[in-house]
Amino acid sequence: MELIRRGVLEAPPGMDQLIAVAVGSSGPVAMWAPSPGLVDPPRARGQAVSRLPEPVPVVLVSYLDSTVPVSSVASAVSVTFPLIDELSDGSFLVVGARCAHRRGGPENNALVIDRDGRVVREGCLGDGIEHLLVAADGTVWAGYFDEGIFGNRGWGTGSRAREPLGADGVVAWSADLERLWGAGVSVIADVYALNVAGSEVWACTYPDFPLLRMRAGASRVIPTRGLDGARGLVVSGNRVGVIGGYDDPLQWVMGRVEGDRFVGTGRGRLACDVEPRGWSAVSCRGPQAHFFDGPEWYCVELG
């Protein structure tokens, strides 16, 4: 497999800090700001705050296959460590990765922002969000890391009202930010990679790095061997490629799913002209995995 450089996303005027980026169903979407405060927030009681006291001006940008913006929207947000995607009606979904549960209840860390830059809907998707993908049917898929699964920041204190919203590891939400479904398996302590592939959703999770195949409201765990540190998944039918590892972010392992087994068919290292410094964001959709090193956009496709 080859790592193809697609180009560098163009920043809107006056906004030189890339805060969040992803590839949605229609192409890349990004959040730009004049300063890095949303991803380098102050700390309180030893933790980075999940919300700034005042909103930060941002520009939300849509791209197509080009790295040149096709539309942009000025807005303001206060949630820190935001993730971004685009909903089917063209509005933007912005979700803060961190979310505190306080005496008065949980923070609303999910924002729907329309094409006029207005926040038209808010909700809570919980703490510890590592992955955010909006499927073609409008379902919002979130993959959580360990603190979002087991609890932190006021979640998981033994009270049912404070049970982590990410306890299932992978959770489906509606475009109205209502919980629809959770993976419902006990093997997930951290979601390392997530892929939306048509009517199916795939994940590679810690520990042991099995594949998790989800469709029609059911989950199936498929054990693997020799995988660790996955960052991306490419999927076509029963063919699956796992990209990344603890020792080498460019390694790949290819295989096919036969019943409840993952049968390896090959492994290697992504061919590329220039090795990136590291991945700041990853979006996996079906046979394509999109990787970002800052605004530099790369793609891997399962042939």
Image (spheres, grey):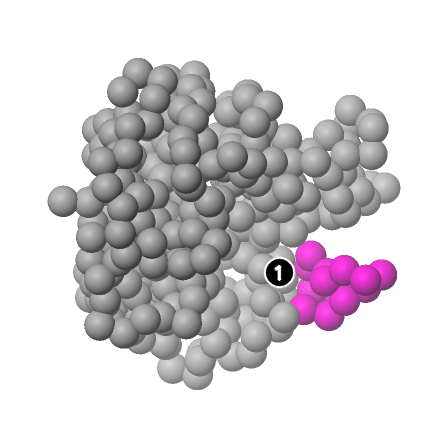
Q: In the structure shown, which secondary structural element does the residue marked by tag 1 occupy? A: loop
Q: Position of residue 83 (x, y in %)?
A: 50, 54
Direction from residue 189 to residue 230 in the image, left or right: left
Up-down: is 262 above or below 149? above
Q: Which residues are magenta?
A: 41-54
The part of the image, by quadrant, that contains residue 254 is: top left
Q: Residue at x 60, y 67 (%)?
A: 38
The quarter in which the C terminus is drawn is top left
Direction from residue 276 to residue 258 in the image, left or right: left
Classify mark 1: residues with Cα within 10 Å, few (<14), some (14-19) or many (20+).
many
Up-down: is 84 above or below 242? below
Direction from residue 173 to residue 242 in the image, left or right: left
The residue nearer to you, when weighing 211 against 141, is: 211
The part of the image, by quadrant, that contains residue 53 is: bottom right
Q: Position of residue 210 (x, y in %)?
A: 45, 31
Direction from residue 147 to residue 83 in the image, left or right: left
Q: Is residue 260 visible?
A: yes
User: Magenta segment: does it hold 47?
Assistant: yes
The extreme bottom residue here reads 14
Residue identified by numbered label 1: 80
